[in-house]
Amino acid sequence: MSLVGWLQIAALFLSVLLVVKPLGSYMARVFSGERTVLSPLLAPVEAGFYGLAGIDARKEQGWLAYTLAMLALSLTGVLALYAILRLQAFLPFNPQGFANVPADLAFNTAVSFVTNTNWQNYAGETTLSHFSQMAGLTTQNFVSAATGMALAMALTRAFARSRAATLGNFWVDLTRATLYVLLPLAIAVALIFVFMGLPQTLEASVTATTLEGAQQVIALGPVASQEAIKQIGTNGGGFFNVNAAHPFENPTALSNLLNIFAMLSVSSALVYSFGQMVGDRRQGWAFLAAIAILLIAGVGAVYWAETYGNPILTSLGLDAAAGNMEGKEVRFGQSASALYAAVTTGLSDGGVNAMHGSLTGAGGLVPMFLIQLGEVLPGGVGSGLYGLVVFAILAVFVAGLMVGRTPELLGKKIDGREMKYAMLAVLILPLAILGFAAVSALLPVALASIGTPGPHGLSEILYAYTSAAGNNGSAFGGLSGNTPWYNTTLGLAMMFGRFGYVVPVMAIAGSIAMKVRTKASSGTFPTHTPLFVGLLIGIILILGGLQFFPALALGPIVEQFAMLAGQTF
């Protein structure tokens, strides 16, 4: 580790901190229906959309109607994207002449992008046409992110209101998230990316002559526009197979920092929006403090593991001072690679600028563990916020048991109904991850896809289902996932992780909204203090991560100890 590396990490987190309040306040005004700086330009466009769609923006929905609208949109999105991929050869903007995507891969990809996972069992530059990339994937990058933001706002209103039967209008929240937040930010970031050298063209490729005199065909396409919403919407799916390690997606150290800044900003600012909308900004800052502590610890752990290096490679004559550079880009080095790896998994982004399968045992353990914590650090746009609120509900319940008082969060009493829904949501992730991973570790058809046998092979399987169920999308690249088994089961894990989690959350929102919001009393456990921050961190670590420890002990943990002992498998 070096001082320069830590300064880069500190500069990134400081820059995000500086935009949390202004961006969070802006989004709070957007979702509260207040006038913003963009209202003169966008309000007529917004009203036009409602008129065309026949939506009454003043009519709100209860939790069930809100949830059904979200599920209907998601199902439509899956069917539409599946159709685009299956009919790709007959659609326009296909200069490469790519064939139709096979059925199982099309299913996996459609579910992946609609659930904001962006798991990719294909190489984008050799599989998908420009039309599929733009009309299919990029559209869902906007819609899936806006859906998460809408759901988070519905839960926020549940705490902000008293005796309310409605949570807002899903179609209004979806439109405002896209029109006022995601689209302006994506345009701005895309233009900056173009300035930094990212391609933005409908050309298929360019032919270059190498130093040896050979001809090399280099893939091109509308990269900058997809890269922008990929990060802002914490989607993570890359235009190219190697994602942000490709120089056309992430050419310089500066573009790398912008990538990480873009993926962190909106999710972090939404936490502040929550505090502002419920009338207690201290709550937003308390949530952000818990997030920062765990995320910075994750960055530090990966950075240490990768700079410590691999004793096995050292014994073969490699310079130990260089640390572990396998799978990393020299233009980024360990600090920027560690920062990206921890942030992309603390979020549900899933983009990578280094190969996670090439990290050391401990270095690969941390990204996997950060996903298993529930993708709340700060998680995907919207989804991370409502996941964090679920953990906060569990935290105040534990606090209530310790002091003998009725659990309460932001003036709303937490009873058995909310606890049952919260536990149902929390248990979805381990059920999907460990269930599918256990079956895959036994089936020959699944084991045949492992790239490296032994503990690392188990890590490849475990990471795949962790990433899918956590709606992250990153991978240990040694696993050959483009098979009917993995395309199908990973797709199912993505659906469980997204919809199996959010339906109980929305049920919590409906129950909380109906309750009277009371003022804090002398007996109320404050949820904005360092004590609560510590309790929340403990709940996230215990309920979010401890249940995975036995599986981790058989994979990355034993791999790390074997590496330190100089053993290979």
Image: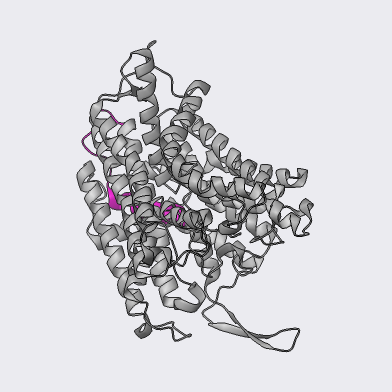
Q: Nearer the viewer, residue 4 or 307?
A: 307
**Image quadrant of residue 179?**
bottom left
Which residue is drawn at the image coordinates 33% and 31% (left, top)?
A: 159
Give the vertical position of 501 relative to 410 (above or below).
Answer: below
Q: Is residue 366 visible?
A: no
Position of residue 494 measured from the top left corner of the image (x, y, whole percent): 35, 56
> Residue visible at 71% across and 43% down?
6
Quarter assignment of residue 408: top left
- Identity of the residue furthest to the top in this view: 522
The figure's colour scheme reads: one colour
Magenta-drawn stretch contains 190: no
Is residue 364 among the parts visible in the rendering? yes
- Of residues 92 and 179, which is closer to you in this image? 92
Is 495 or 515 nearer to us in this picture? 495
Label count reads 0
Front residue (pair 520, 84)? 84
Q: Position of residue 278 (x, y in %)?
A: 38, 31
The quarter of the rendered structure image containing the C terminus is: bottom right
Residue 19 position, x and y percent, is 57, 43
Report the side of 189 relative to 182 (left or right). Answer: right
Does 452 sit above or below residue 83?
above
| Residue at left offset 39%, top offset 40% | 387
Q: Position of residue 388 (x, y in %)?
A: 42, 37
From this view, report whether residue 67 is shown above or below residue 415. below
Split into 4 quadrants, where in the image is the N terminus? top right
Q: Residue 166: within the magenta?
A: yes
Q: Magenta stretch?
A: 161-182
